[in-house]
Image (cartoon, rainbow, N blue to C red):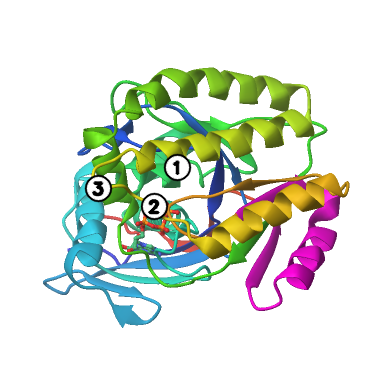
Amino acid sequence: ASEEGSATALANPNIALVKYWGKRDEALILPWTGSLSLTLDAAPTTTTVRLTDAHDDVVLLGGQPLEGTARSRVTRFIDLVRALAGRDERVAVDSHNEIPTGAGLASSASGFAALALAASTAFGLDLDRRALSRLARRGSGSASRSIFDGIAVWHAGHDDESSFAEAVPAPGLELGMVLTVLDARAKSVSSRDGMRRTVDTSPYYPAWVERTPVELEEMLAAIARADFTAVGTIAERNAMRMHATMLGAEPPVRYWGPASVELLDLVANLRGDGLECYATMDAGPNVKILCRADAVDELATRILEAQPDIGVIPARAGRGARLITSEPGGS
Ligand code: ATP
């Protein structure tokens, strides 16, 4: 018999400036290339994991029981934690996303970062940040980066041990971001499926694998010299190149629509007007706009002037995953 263990963790989404797109090992979630992101200070996931005597795991997201693949994605992840801890209790998971789920707004990143911290703590594990990043990676690759404050680089690595994220110090570089919510509905092609199709069928994918490490080095150098213009330019170009690989897939994968393109034009116009900002897009239509931290409010205002009907989420660099409460279970 075991004492009750429970933990509540909070994690923020992160938006990649050098994208993760494509796995070379789907079971371990090892990526073909390294990536780099900004963890935000907005729209966190809060997840509580409690050990129970029940005969099955219960998983709630936003108060509703998860079913099918969404549920098994969580229970298989919990199986990993059980194996790490050498324990076999069932759990009750209760998670809330502030960001819309599955709309390319990084809910899986904040979701699995929070779950990794809450579940490992509830099972009595005390993982260091690197081990936590590796664990979170097994739930969703991008979750490996939401463990860390601010800018994080995920080293592609070559096995489970070597594929982890870590913080990138960025003295003098104060980044901000405005997330636009054009469509909060879950996408029809999951990131997982979109990636797989791109890797398997796009003739442009090998170019992505060859080129991304170079762009990652350029990005790290730009961050080290606090060169916002270079950071933004590399980020925007990298996002367009990722989407280009998808357009080459069979059938093509296209997550953006007309409203996204209008925002790309708006970003170019604002930049022309002297408000320095850069666009990035993920697996969904919602454009994210990078700016200097002190320009976030003005940028949000200008976006809403041009597009009064859309949602905006203003953000700056935020903290990595952290515990809110914990009562680790002893066995
Ligand atoms: P990304 O920006 O990385 O594409 P996303 O959330 O838009 O993230 P997916 O990678 O397709 O899209 O992941 C969405 C899936 O992640 C959801 O359908 C759900 O299964 C899972 N998920 C999201 N939030 C949580 C959470 N808090 N707890 C557990 N699973 C979650």
Q: Confirm if mark 2 falls within 8 A of ligand 1.
A: no
Q: Does residue 25 appear anywhere in the picture?
A: no
For the N terminus, give its image quadrant: bottom left
Which residue is situated farthest in the bottom direction here? 63
Please tell me whether residue 297 belongs to the stretch shown in magenta: yes
Q: Confirm if mark 3 falls within 8 A of ligand 1.
A: no
The residue tagged 2 is 254
Earlier-in-chain disc, 3 versus 1: 1
The residue tagged 3 is 251
**Which numbered disc covers residue 243?**
1
- Residue type pointed to by label 3: Pro
Residue 256: % across, % down:
47, 56
Residue shown at the point (30%, 58%) measured from the top left: 189
Which image quadrant shows ligand 1? bottom left
Of residue 191 and residue 322, the one placed in the foreground of this image is 191
The 10 Å Cα crowd at callout 2, few under 14, some 14 to 19, many 20 or more, is some
Residue shown at the point (26%, 50%) measured from the top left: 193
